[in-house]
């Protein structure tokens, strides 16, 4: 990996997600699930500066940077009230930080440059779903590829033999985050997993069967959430003559039946499973189905992800049919375990045995005690360079703004 070029690429994606929006959109409404974009873009620059330039005792490029952009110190609800720099000043800060980091780059110190790279990649995904949340126009991604959209369904289950899995990343692997450390043995029994994520068509049957109104399909916490949210279907679905429609950014489209259901929270996934007589996989089951006990890096093997294997890097602009990308199948025959939609698992986000926080202590450790669930696999907007079979994402079970769906496992 040429880290300098990857840093430039990540910055280009950040700008693609921001520059076409006006100043009012850069601030947006005060919501618990988004940041003001003007703050978030400045925070990206601050994080890069903090972990690369300022580690060598260089002064900040802005004397007020810590008081504006340190997410560990600045409560989310106050970020709209800060004396934020103007749009032009924010972009200038972002550019100056990157150029100084590139000038100061040392081949023998890649860790913190990779940390800032992957941090920016994750914010790029967050900016993508922020645009969806706020009904902004669809991003105009430069790297768009045609086709690979209409491959239909991918029905049925695969048999995954039981095994002793080394769950997590192994020492000596490429850059990994602290919550993946380290691989430890977990005995996993045999199970049957769906070949593909649950589709819109499948999920619509649950909705049309009044699954949202049936208390018996919901856990106590899930029913409390459903009642409070007044949820009767996925958040962006709309009933229309002739079928379901979906709001996608600032327009409404006919629902595509074989695309994976997306923007559903963990509680919705759990309720669907109860209705269908299925369950969510544990993260150990998910990793075993994706990689087998021999610890493949990706479901298909060791080749880096391409547009033959998976829907990543926003190359197709959104989710594609679950039948796409047969070349990305796992050895067991599971499709799209990398890309398209993040997949909720049944597992609470907790540390692996012997966990020790990495230098960026706020990444994982503060969230272990809170009700977060593990997601696996990445989505259509995730950067390919982030992912591998061991990568763990995590969100609270009520979040349905994120680019998440799920696949299911047969109950014993």
Image: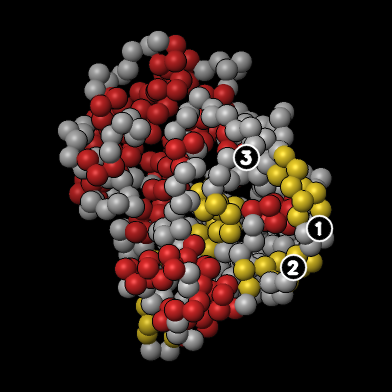
Give residue 192's mark.
2
Task: Residue at 47% x, 73% y: name it.
Answer: 218
The answer to which of marks 1 and 2 sits earlier in the sequence is: 1
> Is mark 1 in CB contact (under 8 Å) with mark 2?
no
Q: Is residue 247 above or below residue 389?
A: below
The answer to which of marks 3 and 2 sits earlier in the sequence is: 2
The answer to which of marks 3 and 1 sits earlier in the sequence is: 1
- How many numbered marks, from 0 up? 3
Distance of mark 3 from mark 1, alpha carbons? 21 Å
Compared across the picture, whether 89 is left or right of 285 comes to left
Which quadrant holds residue 232? bottom left
Q: Specify few, some or many for label 2: CA neighbours under 10 Å numbering under 14, 14-19, or 20 or more.
A: some
Task: Residue at 41% x, 60% y: name it.
Answer: 398
The residue that label 1 is drawn on is 162
The residue that label 3 is drawn on is 352
Q: Secondary structure at mark 1?
A: loop
Task: Residue at 58% x, 58% y: name it.
Answer: 345
93 or 114, nearer to the observer: 114
Q: Is residue 10 above or below residue 188?
A: above
296 or 315, nearer to the observer: 296
> Is mark 3 in CB contact (under 8 Å) with mark 2?
no
Residue 337 on image: x %, y %: 65, 57
Distance of mark 3 from mark 2, alpha carbons? 25 Å
Distance of mark 1 from mark 2, alpha carbons? 10 Å
Compared across the picture, whether 405 is left or right of 136 comes to right
Residue 385 on image: x %, y %: 60, 40
Which quadrant holds residue 259? bottom right
Give residue 70's mark.
none
Q: Secondary structure at mark 3?
A: loop
Residue 394 on image: x %, y %: 51, 49
Protein image colouring: secondary structure
């Amino acid at each position: 990996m040429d880290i300098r070029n990857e840093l430039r690429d990540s910055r280009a994606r950040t700008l693609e997600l921001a520059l076409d929006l006006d100043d009012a959109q850069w601030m947006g409404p005060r919501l618990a699930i988004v940041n003001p974009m003007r703050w978030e873009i400045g925070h990206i620059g601050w994080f890069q500066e903090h972990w690369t330039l300022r580690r060598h005792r260089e002064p900040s490029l802005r004397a007020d940077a810590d008081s504006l952009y340190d997410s560990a110190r600045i409560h989310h609800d106050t970020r709209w009230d800060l004396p934020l720099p103007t749009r032009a000043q924010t972009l200038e800060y972002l550019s100056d930080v990157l150029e100084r980091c590139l000038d100061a780059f040392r081949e023998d110190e890649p860790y913190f440059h990779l940390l800032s790279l992957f941090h920016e990649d994750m914010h790029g995904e967050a900016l993508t779903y922020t645009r969806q949340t706020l009904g902004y126009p669809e991003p105009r991604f430069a790297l768009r590829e045609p086709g690979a959209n209409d491959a239909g369904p991918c029905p049925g289950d695969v048999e995954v033999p039981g095994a002793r899995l080394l769950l997590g990343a192994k020492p000596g692997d490429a850059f990994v985050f602290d919550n993946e450390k380290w691989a430890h043995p977990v005995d996993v029994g045999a199970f049957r997993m769906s070949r593909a994520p649950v589709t819109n068509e499948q999920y619509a049957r649950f909705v049309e069967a009044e699954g949202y109104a049936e208390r018996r399909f919901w856990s106590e916490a899930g029913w409390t959430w459903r009642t409070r949210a007044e949820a009767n279907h996925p958040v962006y679905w709309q009933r229309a003559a002739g079928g379901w429609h979906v709001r996608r950014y600032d327009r409404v489209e006919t629902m595509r039946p074989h695309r994976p259901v997306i923007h559903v929270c963990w509680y919705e996934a759990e309720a669907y499973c109860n209705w269908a007589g299925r369950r969510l996989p544990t993260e150990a089951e998910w990793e075993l189905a994706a990689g087998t006990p021999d610890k493949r890096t990706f479901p298909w093997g060791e080749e880096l992800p391409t547009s033959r294997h998976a829907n990543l890097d926003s190359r197709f602009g959104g989710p594609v049919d679950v039948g796409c990308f047969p070349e990305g199948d796992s050895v067991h025959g599971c499709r799209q375990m990398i890309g398209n939609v993040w997949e909720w698992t049944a597992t609470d986000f907790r540390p692996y045995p012997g966990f020790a926080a990495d230098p960026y202590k706020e990444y994982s450790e503060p969230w272990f005690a809170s009700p977060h669930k593990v997601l696996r696999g990445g989505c259509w907007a995730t950067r390919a360079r982030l992912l591998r079979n061991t990568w763990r994402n995590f969100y609270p079970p009520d979040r349905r703004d994120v680019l998440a769906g799920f696949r299911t496992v047969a109950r014993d």
